[in-house]
């Protein structure tokens, strides 16, 4: 049954499509209505009233209102927040400076060639940085 139904349905649809495309579509013509001339027309000059402001002739409020927020000055807020975040983040991410005594720094730099005073470390023979411990700690 299914094998016969598909070809029959296909043939019916293709026949309907062929028949509908053979003849052009035409709509019923619209009847033309004759307009009558009215002779007692009078030209009138009309002018809309000009509104020169928003509220009672002025732009905006006269004074500050509770809950009123200005929308024209908000462009700098994201830039200020980004700048403040960059400054604070840079300060937090910076390595801490070692604040040891000058005698300690002098002793470590004389003893180890690879001594770095900023983090109080040097590179021993093993290759891993180690903390410098002096008698002046």
Image: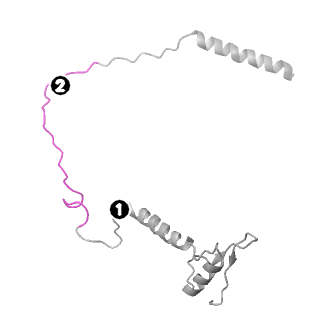
**Residue 5 in which image quadrant:** top right
Range drawn in magenta? 34-61
Instruction: Using the numbered discs, state the Cα–Cα distance from disc 1 to disc 2 in whole angstroms.
Output: 55 Å
21 or 26: nearer the viewer: 21
Looking at the image, is mark 1 or mark 2 earlier in the sequence? 2
131 falls in the magenta region = no
Residue sitting at the far top: 22
Up-down: is 43 above or below 87? Answer: above
Task: Look at the image and tell me in which quarter the N terminus lies.
Answer: top right
Q: What residue do we see at 20% from left, 60% from top?
A: 58
For this view, does 40 lie left or right of residue 33?
left
The spot of residue 20 in percent (x, y) is 61, 14
Query: Does the rendering let one see residue 50?
Result: yes
Q: Residues within 10 Å of mark 2 (few under 14, many from 20)?
A: few
Which mark's residue is nearer the viewer, 1 or 2? 1
Query: SS at mark 2?
Result: loop
User: Mark 1 = which residue?
Assistant: 71
User: Mark 2 = which residue?
Assistant: 38
The spot of residue 29 in percent (x, y) is 42, 15
């Amino acid at each position: 049954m299914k094998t016969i139904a598909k070809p029959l349905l296909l043939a019916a649809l293709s026949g309907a499509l062929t028949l509908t495309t053979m003849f052009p579509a035409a709509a019923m013509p619209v009847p033309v209505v004759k307009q009558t001339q009215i002779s007692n027309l009078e030209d009138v000059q009309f002018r809309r009233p000009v509104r020169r402001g928003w509220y009672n002739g002025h732009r905006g409020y006269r004074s500050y209102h509770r809950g009123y927020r200005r929308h024209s000055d908000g462009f700098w807020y994201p830039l200020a927040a980004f700048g403040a975040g960059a400054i604070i983040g840079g300060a937090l991410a910076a390595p801490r400076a070692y604040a040891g005594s000058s005698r300690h720094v002098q002793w470590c730099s004389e003893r180890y060639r690879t001594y770095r005073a900023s983090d109080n470390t040097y590179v021993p023979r093993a290759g891993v940085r180690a903390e410098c411990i002096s008698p002046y700690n």
